[in-house]
Amino acid sequence: MVANLGIPAVALVTEKFWPQGDFVAGSIGMPDIPRVKLPHPVAGTGAENMRRVAQSIVPDILAALRRDA
Amino acid sequence: MTAMLSAADEMAAVEHLHALRCTDGLPVIVPTAERVNRLVLATGLDPDMVLGTMGPAGGVATVEKVAVAAVMAGCLPDHMPVVIAAVKAVIDPAFDLTEMQSTTHCTAPLIIVNGPARAACGGISGGFGALGPGHRANASIGRALRLAMINIGGARPGESDMALLGHPGKFTYCLAEDEENSPFPPLHTALGFAPEDSVVTVIGAEAPHSVLYSPTGEIAEDARRLAQVLAIGLANVATNNAQLRNGAAVVVLNPEHAQVFQKANLSREAIQKALFGYCFHRPETLKAVAGGFAPKGDDRGPIHAFRTHEDILVLVAGGTGLYSMVMPTWCAGPHVNRFVSKTVEMNAFCEVTFQPTH
């Protein structure tokens, strides 16, 4: 929805939900929307682990945004 | 215009529909053009009339496509007004259909039917076992909505319907209120409709949870204890209603339990208010067990499961006895997966005589 407004956006999707990401990206007509894969699960793994995951994906998010530009 | 498939015979067609993941896993009636046209005709509506779009696929729900789902579900022409109204209800943006179809929570659209449509649209049961097997209209109407959600909305397990386990009500989940055996005015009149209206109210709901209460004959105490035990089932600390809060929920009173409240001179609204009052937890209780959804901060006051008593739908259905049912809900989505009521339009419908084909 954000990407549809022309605002650069990256979807963060855990690996278990990657197929759902494929489905939704296709159904909204944005099959190439930038996505970054996260390990699963992230929710419920504690603040420290979430910070670690967040730090590890920063380069992927920046790369996805640059590819989309 | 709907694409046509071909198959060697009826059985091959059913297998083909299974292979295409167009079924709910059970055999379906093959939606031939003739059968679909019969149900479209019964609606009195243009087959290409758009009712709305259904997420997460964003499929366009035309009258014809809904009729395809209804044929597959085994619907009769008489059922169509209710099927159309139920589809209109879930398409309403307040229902959050896309999000509800996609969630990991176990939730299914419960269709509650009020008014003359209960008898006129195929005899929708609100009596013994209304949510169980053996009631053709209940089973077919609920299944038609599910098949529309699968084939128009695109909900398929593990791919776009991410319910971790789901529940059996995802096959079909439809009942009528037993207005004749209820001591209260019909549910739809409490939602702003006229008694003579026919109305479907659709709410995303968990499977029914049984609540046992055996009255003792102490009128005021029976009413208090019944409300309290219903509230425990409705918003115990394991429910989304307790932990996420602000959603709605359903209480289905059997006629005997409804009488317990009526004898204590409690109206539907008074019952709702009593339930609202009991549906809370202390912050320390939630902090002790709710993990990531535990409340933050040092507030000491009770945390209510509902925003208002009006978010607790109370109706009467089922055989008479010691068991009522409660259905907690998901409590998420942009509109908190709001329940939606739609009028069942019966005037536009044509009479269709059943003529078996060979």
Image (cartoon, coloured by chain):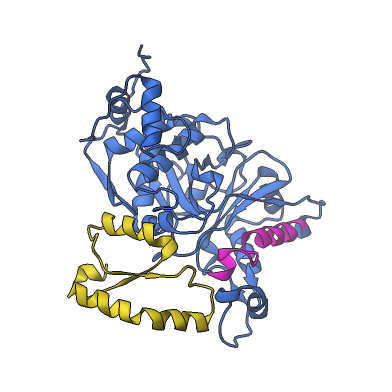
Chain colours: A yellow, B blue
Q: Quadrant of the C terminus of chain B?
A: top left
Locate residue B62 relative to residue B186 in the image: left or right: left
The residue at the far top in this view is B358
* Residue at image coords 65%, 64%: B236
Instruction: Note whether B311 is above or below B342 in the view shown.
Output: below
| In this rendering, position of residue B103 left or right of residue B92 | right
Total numbered labels placed on residues in the image: 0
Q: Nearer the viewer, residue B255 or A34?
A: A34
- Seen from the viewer's position, the closer of residues B354 and B294 is B294
* Left-right relation of B310 to B219: left
Residue occupying the point 68% across, 62% down? B232
Q: Please tell me which residue is depicted at 60% across the width and 75% down the height of the picture.
A: B291
* In the image, residue B117 lies in the stretch drawn in magenta: no
Q: Residue furthest bottom?
A: B298
Residue positioned 68% across, 53% down in the render = B261
Q: Is residue B232 magenta?
A: yes
Q: Is residue B133 left or right of residue B145?
A: right
**Magenta extent:** B222-244
For the N terminus of chain B, give its image quadrant.
top left
Q: Residue A31: name its quadrant.
A: bottom left
Q: How far from the left and from the top, in percent, is residue B11?
A: 41, 22
In this rendering, the answer to whether B76 lies above or below B315 is above
B68 and B75: which is toward the camera? B68
Picture quarter containing residue B130?
top right
Query: x and y percent of residue A36 in the render?
Result: 34, 71
Q: Position of residue B279 (x, y in %)?
A: 63, 67
> Can residue B198 be seen at all in this image of the molecule?
no
Mostly what secondary structure, the magenta segment? helix
**Which x, y percent locates residue B52?**
28, 49
Which residue occupies the foreground of this view, B178 or A50? A50
Vertical placement of B253 versus B352: above or below?
Answer: below
